[in-house]
Image (cartoon, rainbow, N blue to C red):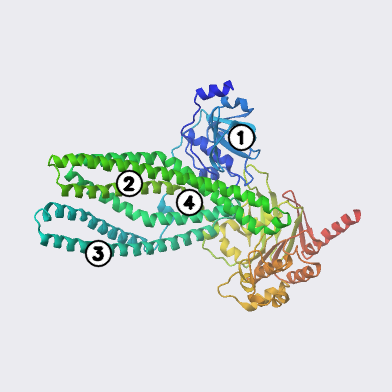
Amino acid sequence: MSRWRAQLRRASAVRGLPMILQGQVGECGLAAMAMIAHYHGCHIGLAELRHRFLLSRQGTNLANLVAIAQALGLQARALRLEMDALPELQLPCIVHWDLNHFVVLKRVGARRLQIHDPASGPRSLTPGEFARHFSGIALELSPAADFRPQAAAPAVALSSLIGRVHGLGRAVWQVLALAFALEVLSLGMPFQLQWIVDQAVPSADIGLIHVLGAGFLLLVVLQSCIALLRGWLIASVSAQLGFQWMGQVFAHLLALPLAYFEKRHLGGIQSRFASIVQVQRTLTTGFTQTLVDGVLVIGTLGLMLVYSVGLSAITLVAVALYAATRWLWLRRMREAAAEQLLWDARQHTHLLESVRGIQGVRLFGRQQVRRMDWTHLLAEQTNAQLRLAQGEVWQSSLKRLLFGCERVLVIWLAAFAILRAELSLGMLLAFMAYREQFAMRLSELIDRLVEFRLLRVHLERVADIVHQPREEADQRIDAPAWNDTTIELCGIGFRYADDTPAVLEDVSVHIASGECVAITGASGCGKTTLVKVILGLLKPSVGHVKIGGRPLSEAALTHYRAIVGTVMQDDLLFTGSVSENISFFDPEPDQAQVERCARIAGVHQEVEQMPLGYASLLSEAGNGLSGGQRQRVLLARALYRSPRILVLDEATSHLDVMNEQRVNRAIQAMQVTRIIVAHRRETVGMAARVITLEQGRVVSDQPIADWQRLQERSTAAD
């Protein structure tokens, strides 16, 4: 215990440690390293770390973290220790958590330990709570001799996220003009009070009272009309910005590489679109008013100074104090906002998984477990939201206190100014009206500036989509004639991350145009990965793919895939009719082709027996269809585009023997290049050649007759 007290006396507080949340599955170690690097002056972003150090979605280990640290110029020291030795650690440091996670230990105290968890944000734990998660391993990091500080990258530019929105600039200028006119008119209202109190009433000038009343009544009507027009225009701009921007972001999302989706949860991607809505709302409702307020507070302050410099100074001091308190709370509010978004994404991911996997949940009786897990995520989201709301309540109360005291003090001192004949009663009323406008506008301007700073959390989430490079499919416009569909794999090697074993090694295969080749091997040997490399979904780490003698890396993937039909293991149907799914929602579907492909796939008769035939509706899960029927609909979809290359990855694994034989005969009769991934002998038997993979390597490439004899001898030996 004395060690803990000694450490407490030494005040092991770590200042300047940022909170960086992981954006992908399994990158907790990378996020923790980014926090430590920032603390030591190397302000490298998480996106740059992802680019420099390719990691798998399974995460990383301590050895890889040491290698990353050395690459960043940090000296790493791995330690195995007990709880009692924690006070001796050099903070901040990375600690192993729950045997499968990394967090940053920020502060060690006698009663509380503070960590930065890349998965959930800052946390304060008792020693007992910390001990339940601590795996006994820590990684101390300090600048090495070759360490080079790195300046922080520029903040995410809003213009780089919005892109080009047609008509936005003109609409914004119109809104600004209307808002400026509206606010200028409001500056004239306090003069009514001064003129009536100081001139019309003392002189009993009834005519002047009527003129002032009628004139300012017309001013109010004009203000109302301008406000109505401005409101309509803002609503129009908001709808236009939201429609065009979300459309652009969704189009960009569809063009991203497959790896982007494999490393992120569905709920996380969904929440990024929610951030678009938040950014849009802030821009359309707050941006123009902020510009107008920024200009008009100067004019209002000038009018206040004309009346009284001393009273104006009191208001300025109150505004300065309010701005300082908002700035001091900014970082805490930003962290709470980031946590709330993170837990919201996790809660939605859990909900979507539970709905999609409801059959398994029911069969295994895990409703209660799923409900409890979801409730925990919802509680964390609610707590983060509560912290955010509590911060706003504190700020609102402080604002009310500051400006309430300031108003009382101004009236207090103004009374003495009237007694000294420095101000008239009308001048005081006008000053108070301008003071009210100034304090309200400037405090709202401060609030909006803080809101814009908090908007950075949402901008970074949107940037995670928009700033990702598109797949090369949309970066080339050439459209060669794919008359030759010969496929050549030249020394192909592939690994999903720098710290994972190779999935494919030195794979060299030649598939002639029109040939039917089967790829077989044990589960996990790399068959599906090889197929994805052939399709251009994955880029080989080593070697290259040629189609018709042309490197696939130099081809337009969009045009290449237009001649390829595929059925992959995890393919899904979409909400729509059977006909729409087979034609894959072709804008001008060929119904005769739809039915012809359904006949080849052996599903036509079963579709005809449905109540609405080809108009029968399906869902993502293919409700109402058996596993074999879903596979045959997917096969019909692959055939609809009349492909020159057909790739089938376990495409008939759910079919009965009779249906599989019928489908195999139909495929065998097709004069196209066919690549079939299968385990069943009946499916492999329709190929002319069989390529066998073992641990990512080609161990045999032989004619079907030789492969079948080998299988027969193997069966006889068993």
| Residue located farthest toward the left when viewing the structure as drawn | 203
Residue depicted at 31% across the width and 64% down the height:
228
Residue 3: quadrant of the picture: top right
Q: Is residue 74 left or right of residue 487?
A: left
Q: Earlier in the sequence, mark 1 or mark 2?
A: 1
**Separation (CA) of disc 1 from disc 2:** 42 Å
Residue located beneath label 3 in the image: 221
Closer to viewer: mark 3 or mark 4: 3
- Residue 144 locus on image (x, y percent): 52, 29
| x 44%, y 47%: residue | 456
SS for dot 4: helix
Q: Position of residue 682 (x, y in %)?
A: 81, 64
Is mark 2 in CB contact (under 8 Å) with mark 4?
no
Residue pointed to by mark 2 = 443
Question: Which is nearer the N-term, disc 4 or disc 1?
Answer: 1
Front-lying residue, 555 or 284: 284
* Amino acid type of the residue tagged 3 in the rendering: Val
Q: As drawn, is 195 to the left or to the right of 164?
A: left
Q: Is residue 646 above or below residue 448?
A: below
Checking the image for residue 262, the label placed there is none
**Residue sitting at 28 percent across and 39 percent down?**
317
Check residue 129 in the rendering and tell me which mark sits there, or answer none: 1
Q: Amino acid at mark 4?
A: Ala
Q: What is the crowding at mark 4: few (fewer than 14 residues within 10 Å), some, or many (at least 20)? A: some
Q: Label 4, label 1: how many angstroms apart (C-alpha)?
A: 36 Å
